[in-house]
Image (spheres, rainbow, N blue to C red):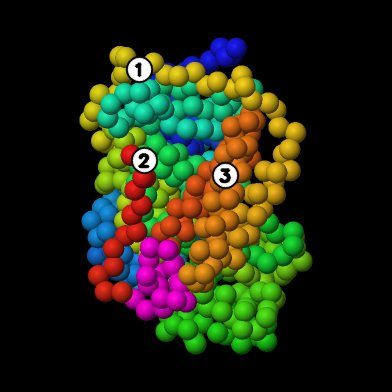
Amino acid sequence: MINHQVEHTCDVLVIGAGAAGLTLALRLADKANVIVLSKSKLKEGSTYYAQGGIAAVFDETDSIESHVQDTLVAGAGLCDEKAVRITAENARDSLETLISYGVPFDTVTNEQGQQKYHLTREGGHSHRRILHAADATGKAVQKTLIRSAQAHQNIHIFERYNAVDLITSRTTKQTGKAVYGAYVWNRNKEQVEVIKATKVILATGGASKVYQYTSNPDIASGDGIAMAWRAGCRVANMEFNQFHPTCLFHPDARNFLLTEALRGEGAYLLRPDGSRFMPDFDDRAELAPRDIVARAIDYEMKRLGADCMYLDISHKPKSFIKQHFPNIYKRCKEYGIKIHKQPIPVVPAAHYTCGGVITNMQGETDLAGLYAIGEVAYTGLHGANRMASNSLLECLVFAEAAASHILSTPMTQTHYPDIPHWDDSQVADSDEEVVIQHNWHELRLLMWDYVGIVRTNKRLERAMRRIELLQQEVQEYYANFKVSNNLLELRNLLDVAELIVRCAMSRKESRGLHYNLDYPELQDNPTPSIITPDKF
C-alpha cells in the first residue's frame, strides 16, 4: 500500500540556500510565495566557507572594461563575452544590494579622512577590486542573507530537505518540456514529499565532492546538475573543474582552504628547500591564474616526490597578517603552524565547477519554468577557468537577472497535472550501507587519479568503465532500498562524474583547467563542450 503523500504548493521553489538561492528568494518574496530547500543546516553551503571576496569596480583607477578583459584572459578563450560583460556591468549594483542588507565589508580611512571599502587583489586581476569581510567574506554574506530571509513572511525555509528529482512533463505524461515541482526527501521524517511550484530554481552549487580532495563542504554533490540532466537539460564544459592551488596540508585540517588573497597580498610559493618556483612557470608568478598555479604545484610535487609545497607570508608583519587573515592565522595556530614565522604546507584540491546546466542570460534552462543560477549553471562567464572572486558575484548578478525575468511572467499556477505518488512500498530499509560508502570512496579516488589536474586518454577511458559499473550497482541499489542522504548524493555524483569524463573525452586539446598529456596543444576556434541527453 502506498503511503499518504505529503504535498506542498508554492509559487517559486528554490533548491539551494546559498548566495544565489537566498538572493533570488529575497528579490521575489514581496510578490511571490517562496519555498527554499536547504539540504543541511542553512550555513552548510559553499557560500559560507568562501574566504576571498567579491569582485566589482569601486576604485576610480579601475574600470569595467579592465574587469571584463581580466575575466576573458583567465577564461582562456572560452568565455561568452556577453555573459562576462553583463556580470562586470552589474557587479557594483549587486554589491550595493548586499551592503543594503547589512553585509559588513571591510573599510579603510584615506588621507582625506574619507571611509572607503578596502579592496584587495587576487590572481588574474590587474587591479585591486575585491571587496571582502576580512578573510571570511562568504560567512558574512551568508549570515546576512539568512537573517533577511528568515525575517520575510513569504519565504519558507525547509532545512534538511534533499531534492530527489524534478517533476516534469515526462513525469506527468504531458507533452512538451516543462517543470511542475520536485520530489523531495524530508530528512527529518525520512519520507519523500512533493512540492508543486510554478517556477523551480536550481541554486545547488557545484560538484567538487566528486573528487577525493576538495575544499568544498560535504553537500557539494552536483545535485542540481544531475537532476537537470536526468530531466532533459543540456550541460556544458564539465571538464573544467577548478582545483584551488592552496588547501592546508595537515591530517586534521579537513577541507581548509587558504584564500588566494594571501598570494594577492604577497605570499610566496616555495619548494621544501625554501626556493620559489612560480617564476619558473609564469611571468605573473604567484598571481598567475589558478589553473597554472595548481599545475605548477602538482608538477613540483610529482617531480620531487613531495607530499606538499609551501605558502609563505612570514615576511609580512604579524600585525598585518592578523588584521587581514584572522581566521587563517587562528586556524593554522590550532594546528601548530605559526604563519608569521613559518611557511604553510599546501596541496591543490578540487574547488569550483566551471561548467553546468546550460542557461541563457536570465537563468532559463531547456525546461520551461526551470532556472539555474550560480555554480550549478553554465552561462559562459568562466570559460575554461574561473577568475578569483567572480563566483559569489555570478550568484548575485544572475539571481537578480532570473528574478527580474520571473517577475515579468505569471507566477501563480491554477491547475497542476496529476503528479504520480512516490511509491516506496516495495523497497526495504538498507542493511548494507557499507556498499554505498565503498562505492563513494571508489568514485572519488578514481576521479582524483584519472580525471584530476593532469589527464590522459587511457585514464579517461578507465574512469568511464568504472563509472558505468558503479552506476549499474547504484541503480540496482536505488531500486531496492529506501532513499538516504548518502544514496541520493552518490547517485548524483555518478551522473556528474559521467558528464565530466564525457566532456573531457570530447576535448582534443589542453585549455584552461583541462590538461590532457595526449593533446598538449591549443586548438584554433575552441567551442564549449555541450552534452545533450540521448533520451530526449
Rendered position, 420 above or below 336: above
Residue 268 is at least partly visible in this image: no
Q: Position of residue 475 (x, y in %)?
A: 57, 39
Residue placed at 38% from the left, 63% from the top?
506
Q: Position of residue 49 (x, y in %)?
A: 56, 51
353 or 146: nearer the viewer: 353
Residue at which label 1 appears: 417
Question: Which one is in front in this view, the residue at disc 2 or the one at disc 1?
Answer: 2
- SS assignment at label 2: loop
Q: CA distance from mark 1 to mark 3?
A: 32 Å
Which residue is labeled 2 in the image? 535
Circle 3 packing at 10 Å, graded few (<14), some (14-19), many (20+), is few
Q: For the magenta stretch, what is the residue range?
A: 505-522
Q: Position of residue 379 (x, y in %)?
A: 32, 51
- Relative to residue 109, is residue 490 depicted above or below? above
- Circles 1 and 3: CB atoms closer than 8 Å: no
Give, as a three-letter code, the residue at label 2.
Lys
Q: Is residue 337 magenta?
A: no
In terms of image quadrants, where is residue 487? top right
Secondary structure category for the residue under label 1: loop
Q: Earlier in the sequence, mark 1 or mark 3?
A: 1
